[in-house]
Image (cartoon, rainbow, N blue to C red):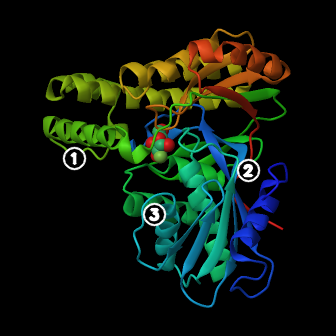
Amino acid sequence: MVAVNSPLDSRAKSALIEAFGKDGDGDGNDPVVALAPGRVNLVGGHTDYNEGLCLPIAVDRHVAVAARPRDDSTIHAYASDFDEIRTIEPGDVPDGWVAYVAAVADALRERGSIPGVELAITSNLPTGAGLSSSAALELAVGRTLVELGGIDISARDLALACWRAEREGVGVECGILDQFAVALCEPGSALFLDCRTREVEQVPLGDANLGLLVIDTGVSHALADSGYNDRVRECRSAVSALSISAGREIGSLSDVSEADLERHREALTPTEYRRARHVLGENARVERARDALADGDFDAVGTAMVESHESLRDDYEVSCDELDAAVELAIGVEGVYGARMTGGGFGGSAVALVGGSVLERAKEEIRSDLSDRVGPDARVFACRPSGGVHLVD
Ligand code: GAF
């Protein structure tokens, strides 16, 4: 058994040996180990696939992958959380967690030669909790594969390859938020991401005494099975209707001004109108929150977070009772600047921005009411801003 208290990267190495033996079929060298973080998103929900803006922070919960090469092209993958070994050949389209491994390997084969590998996955990032565990798995696998394949690729291009893998290999029509956050966040900063230009700007948190609390509702979601792809389609149909009404090609909802949206409101169904109103308002909130964060005005960041949650709940309809209750609970606690759902929604987690000096007290206060107000499986934990995917010695 792998000791649960040892560092995650050591656990991944031990899991590799446990699953495949000391040397396995590999070359006897030490394995390559990558750590990829989860993320929270301060503001900018469901804007990424609308070419909009986001403001994520990577957190210090990770997926670790330890891998060593084989002399064939087969991937043997072990997930310690499921205690399961799966074997995949190039081009296979398997189900379950290994679908992410297969899709990333296939996407990277377009960039160079990927050897067969034995790999082990360990994690302290909850899955299905809206903290980007899928992207963390993709990036951790991808980082080890490019290292073993000797492929020269930037973090940004690795993120794009993993994004394509999730869309084409797993069937989620996601935007680039998660893969970019997991690849490009830097310790001590939030990442201002423009999903149209795919340019990023680090927004330093300075020596601000800030804390993050994650409230995992315990209501699990899988994007592929949730209403996520429906929202993507609703936004697409709003764009088509607006293009016809305006008599010009509109690329995305982020191309539309609030005045244009009102002018062409009649061309949209009430649902399309509310989806569009969320996206426009959310982009504006991200800009406000980015400026406020840079100015150290955390009350203003918190206000943008709460407005974001209300818009996701009422206009975008991706929240649920447990997420609403988690946000209500958090914003009632002294020292909490703001809170909102994070991730795709329909379950998962809320994130709260909290003054660092009151973090422990706020966490305990939230914890004491969690099961009554949010649900029996809910839990709260503190996390710190972290850096993006990296190799560990
Ligand atoms: C999920 C998706 F994967 C992201 O692309 C993003 O759309 C997010 O939901 C909502 O902002 O995490």
Question: Which residue occupies the foreground of this view, 246 or 11?
Answer: 11
The three-letter amino acid code for the residue at tag 3 is Ala
From mark 3 to mark 2, how far is it between C-alphas? 22 Å
Q: Is residue 251 visible?
A: yes
Amino acid type assigned to the residue bearing label 1 in the image: Glu
Task: Check whether the beta carbons of the residues at disc 3 and disc 2 lie within 8 A of each other.
Answer: no
The residue at 68%/27% (across/down) is: 380
Residue 271: x percent and y percent? 24, 26
Under tag 1, what secondary structure? loop
Q: Which residue is mark 1?
A: 249
Instruction: Name the front one of labels 2 and 1.
Output: 2
Residue 231: quarter of image: top left
Residue with the mark numbered 3: 165
Cα separation, mark 3 vs mark 1, equals: 29 Å
Above or below, 349 relative to 141: above
Q: Can you say which quadrant of the picture contains the C terminus?
A: bottom right
Task: Tell me the residue at 62%/79% (across/down).
Answer: 117
275 horizontally vs 325: left or right: left
Instruction: Report which residue position mark 2 lands on.
Output: 387
In the rendered image, residue 277, in percent from the top left (x then y), is placed at 34, 25
Q: Residues within 10 Å of mark 3 (few under 14, many from 20)?
A: many
Q: Give the SS element for disc 2.
A: loop
